[in-house]
Image: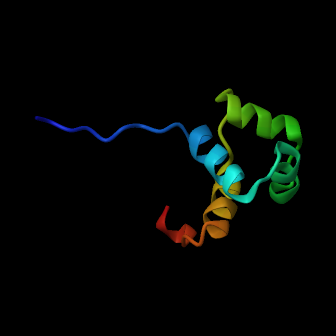
Amino acid sequence: METQAKYHHPADALRRFMESRDWSQAELAAHFRVSQSAVSRWLSGERVPREMHVRWWLLAEGVDPRCL
């Protein structure tokens, strides 16, 4: 049987990140210095975070952003 890695949308990972910290959209927006509406668009899949936001996110998770 062939197994395939499941694709997870960045919004799913971002939601898990928020839940792990018990953060609201407004709290995440303040952390990333963006508007709450930007976070809402990320979570809806309408937009994806910019590279600098992904790097901040990786740092917050303890991952070296140079891995990108």
The N terminus - image quarter: top left
* Residue occupying image coordinates x 71% and y 51%: 18
Q: Position of residue 47 (x, y in %)?
A: 68, 32
Q: How many marks?
A: 0
Report which quarter residue 31 is drawn in.
Answer: bottom right
Q: Position of residue 57 (x, y in %)?
A: 66, 60
Q: Residue at x 85, y 48 (%)?
A: 34
User: Is 22 rendered above or below residue 66?
Assistant: above
Residue closest to the eye, 51 or 7: 7
Q: Residue at x 68, y 26 (%)?
A: 46
Residue 4, by quadrant, is top left
Q: Classify 58 as above or below 6.
A: below
Q: Position of residue 21 (x, y in %)?
A: 73, 59
Image: 38 above or below 58:
above
Display coloring: rainbow
Left or right? Give the position of 9 relative to 6: right
Residue at the limit of the structure toward the left, as seen here? 1
Which residue lies at the image location 84% right of the left edge and 49% below the top edge?
29
